[in-house]
Image (cartoon, rainbow, N blue to C red):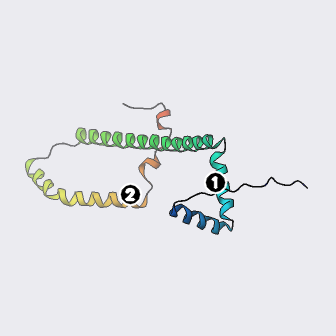
Amino acid sequence: MIKAPKKQRLSVYLDPDVMTALAAYAGRRDQSLSLIAEAGIASFLSPDMAERQEAATAKRLDQLDRRMTRMERDLGISVETLAVFVRFWLTTTPALPELAAQAARAKSSERYEAFVAALARRLAKGPKLRQEISEDIGQSGHEDR
């Protein structure tokens, strides 16, 4: 039977908040304070600790980069959609005679409120337009600009 080397005693002073957290963690795990503290110190001193932290940071940065790329793509689709609509509307909608224009202006507030309500319903229930557009739209080779 191999005997483990005798452990050495270490006295440390902990901030009361750290001590409370340590005691709570040890209690939840049904382990001694000493065992939890020893594991924490060993992990901190581990030679690959820096590498694990770097890997975790790199993974998180990659996730953020992918999210930013999707956001840029979605914003680009939104801007292009609005630009195409405005160009189409401006080129296909004839100017109204003055009497009809006055009536249209009177109706515009009601129509705007209906538009905002429809937009709210669309956003609440989904799917979003960006979800309906294929991720590879730019790879289709049919880009009109």
Q: Position of residue 77 (x, y in %)?
A: 39, 41
Tell me which residue sits at (56%, 58%) in the image.
Answer: 13
Which tag is nearer the camera, tag 2 or tag 1? 1
For this view, does 16 lie left or right of residue 102? right
Q: Tell me the kind of residue under disc 2.
A: Leu
Q: Position of residue 71 (x, y in %)?
A: 42, 44
Regarding mark 1 in the picture, which secondary structure is present there?
A: helix
In this view, the residue in front, 72 or 127, is: 72
In this view, the residue in front, 31 or 142, is: 31
- The picture quadrant where one finds residue 39 is bottom right
For mark 2, what is the residue?
Answer: 123
Q: Tell me the kind of residue under disc 1.
A: Gly
Crowd tier of the residue under label 2, counting other residues whose Cα lies within 10 Å: few below 14, some 14–19, many 20 or above: few
Tell me which residue sits at (23%, 57%) in the image.
Answer: 112
The residues tagged by marks 2 and 1 sit, at their Cα atoms, a distance apart of 47 Å
Q: Is residue 134 visible?
A: no
Tell me which residue sits at (42%, 32%) in the image.
Answer: 143
- The picture quadrant where one finds residue 55 is top right
For this view, does 107 lie left or right of residue 71? left
For mark 1, what is the residue?
Answer: 40
Tell me which residue sits at (24%, 60%) in the image.
Answer: 113
Tell me which label, 2 or 1, sits earlier in the chain: 1
Regarding mark 2 in the picture, which secondary structure is present there?
A: helix
Instruction: Name the image quarter holding the N terminus.
Output: bottom right
Single out the residue that lies furthest toward the right: 1
Crowd tier of the residue under label 1, counting other residues whose Cα lies within 10 Å: few below 14, some 14–19, many 20 or above: few
In this view, the residue in front, 72 or 93, is: 72
